[in-house]
Image (cartoon, grey):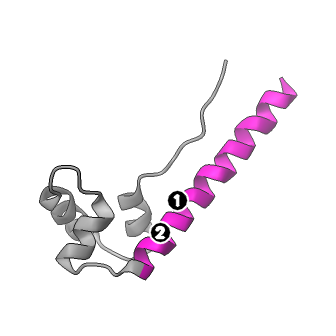
C-alpha cells in the first residue's frame, strides 16, 4: 500500500493562519478568472498582500514536506 502525502489547499492555509476569513476565501474563489491562481485573485481583490501569500505558500510546503517525510518513514518500516 503506497500513501501520498497530503498537500493542504492554499485557501485553507490562509484561513488557518488567520490571514483571511472563510467569507473572503469564498469571494476569492468565485472571483477567480480562468487560469488565475487563488492567491492572485485574493491579491487583486486587496484581501491579502504578497507577504501573506509567501508566508502561506511556505506553510503549505512545510506541511506537505512534513507529511512526505512521515510517509517515507512509514514505508521504510514496512
Where residue 24 sits: x, y (%)?
22, 70
Asked which secondary structure carries label 2, the reply is helix
Residue at (22%, 50%) from the top-left corner?
Answer: 35
The residue under label 1 is: 60
Furthest toward the right, the residue is 77
Residue 22 appears anywhere in the view:
no
Q: Give the range drawn in magenta.
A: 51-78
Residue at (41%, 52%) from the top-left corner?
Answer: 9
The residue under label 2 is: 56
Q: How crowded is mark 2: few (under 14 residues within 10 Å), some or many (20 or more)?
A: many
Q: In which quarter of the image is the N terminus?
A: top right
Q: Quadrant of the C terminus?
A: top right
Mark 2 to mark 1 CA distance (whole Å): 6 Å
Tell whether position 63 is magenta.
yes
Residue at (25%, 78%) from the top-left corner?
Answer: 47
Q: Residue 20 carries which label?
A: none
Circles 2 and 1, Cβ within 8 Å, touching? The answer is yes
Amino acid at each position: 500500500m503506497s500513501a501520498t502525502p497530503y498537500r493542504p489547499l492554499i485557501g485553507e492555509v490562509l484561513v488557518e493562519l488567520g490571514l483571511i476569513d472563510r467569507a473572503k476565501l469564498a469571494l476569492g474563489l468565485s472571483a477567480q478568472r480562468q487560469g488565475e491562481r487563488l492567491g492572485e485573485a485574493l491579491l487583486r481583490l486587496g484581501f491579502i498582500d504578497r507577504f501573506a501569500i509567501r508566508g502561506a505558500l511556505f506553510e503549505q510546503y512545510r506541511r506537505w514536506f512534513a507529511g512526505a517525510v512521515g510517509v517515507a518513514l512509514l514505508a521504510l518500516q514496512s
